[in-house]
Every structure is written in structure tokens, then in C-alpha cells.
């Protein structure tokens, strides 16, 4: 599932410090306020959520995000598995 959602500035600053898998592409895990974790979320240029792998529709709303972080799996180079990078 692909779409573009622009993140608020505090998230952009945090993601800018994370490991990229390709130029401008960062894979993260998103934890929602209800405790649900959405893995393999792709962020472009630290500011746009462009993909949530494995979902046909968008799995969360921006206001539901509690935390955005990287697991060890998120930090591995998996650029060949991506649709959009």
C-alpha cells in the first residue's frame, strides 16, 4: 500500500538521526497509542510516510502514532525488497 503522509516536524527531526536503507529511504516501526506495532513502514526524506508493507489500506491515522523507532531488522539493507525505492 502506498500513499504519502507528511510527518510533523518533531518526528522529522527524530527520523533524520535514523539509519537509511537507501538514499532518503528509512524503514521504521510505528507503535500506535493502542499498543499495535506496524512494521516495515517506509519514510522518504525523513518526512513522508510512503508505504506500509503488507497493507492494502492505510493501517493508522497520524494522530494515532505514539512512537516511531527502528528495530535491528529495520536497520538492515533491504532495498531490493522495496516497491518504491
Image (tube, grey):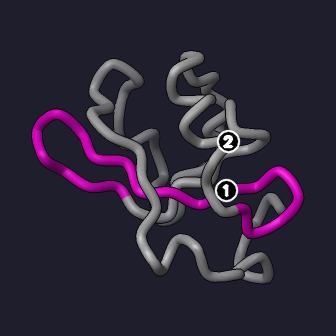
Q: Residue furthest front?
A: 17
Horizontal side of residue 45 vs 52, given as left or right: right
State the residue at coordinates (63%, 47%): 17
Between 14 and 38, the one nearer to me in the picture: 14
Between 24 and 36, the one nearer to me in the picture: 24
Sort mark 2 into few (<14), some (14-19) or many (20+) by Cα contacts within 10 Å: some
Q: Secondary structure at mark 1?
A: strand
State the residue at coordinates (37%, 26%): 61
Nearest-to-viewer mark from 1 and 2: 2
Horizontal side of residue 13 vs 83, given as left or right: left
Q: In the rendered image of this protein, does residue 39 appear above or below residue 5?
A: below
Q: Is residue 73 magenta?
A: no
Horizontal side of residue 45 vs 48, given as left or right: right
State the residue at coordinates (69%, 81%): 78
Q: Position of residue 19 (x, y in %)?
A: 66, 62
Q: Position of residue 23 (x, y in %)?
A: 88, 58
Cα–Cα span, label 1 and label 2: 9 Å
First reached walking from the N terminus: tag 1 or tag 2: 2
Quarter of the image where one finds residue 20: bottom right
Identify the residue under disc 2.
16
- Segment colored magenta: 20-38
Quarter of the image where one finds residue 82: bottom right
Q: Secondary structure at mark 2?
A: loop
State the residue at coordinates (46%, 61%): 70
Identify the residue under disc 1.
26
Q: In the rendered image of this protein, does residue 50 appear above or below residue 75?
A: above
Amino acid at each position: 500500500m502506498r500513499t504519502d503522509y507528511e510527518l510533523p516536524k518533531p518526528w522529522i527531526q527524530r527520523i533524520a538521526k535514523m539509519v537509511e536503507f537507501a538514499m532518503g529511504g528509512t524503514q521504521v516501526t510505528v507503535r500506535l497509542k493502542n499498543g499495535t506495532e506496524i512494521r516495515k513502514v517506509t519514510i522518504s526524506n525523513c518526512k513522508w510516510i510512503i508505504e506500509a508493507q503488507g497493507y492494502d489500506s492505510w493501517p493508522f491515522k497520524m494522530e494515532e502514532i505514539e512512537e516511531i523507532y527502528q528495530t535491528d531488522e529495520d536497520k538492515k539493507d533491504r532495498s531490493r525488497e522495496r516497491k518504491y525505492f
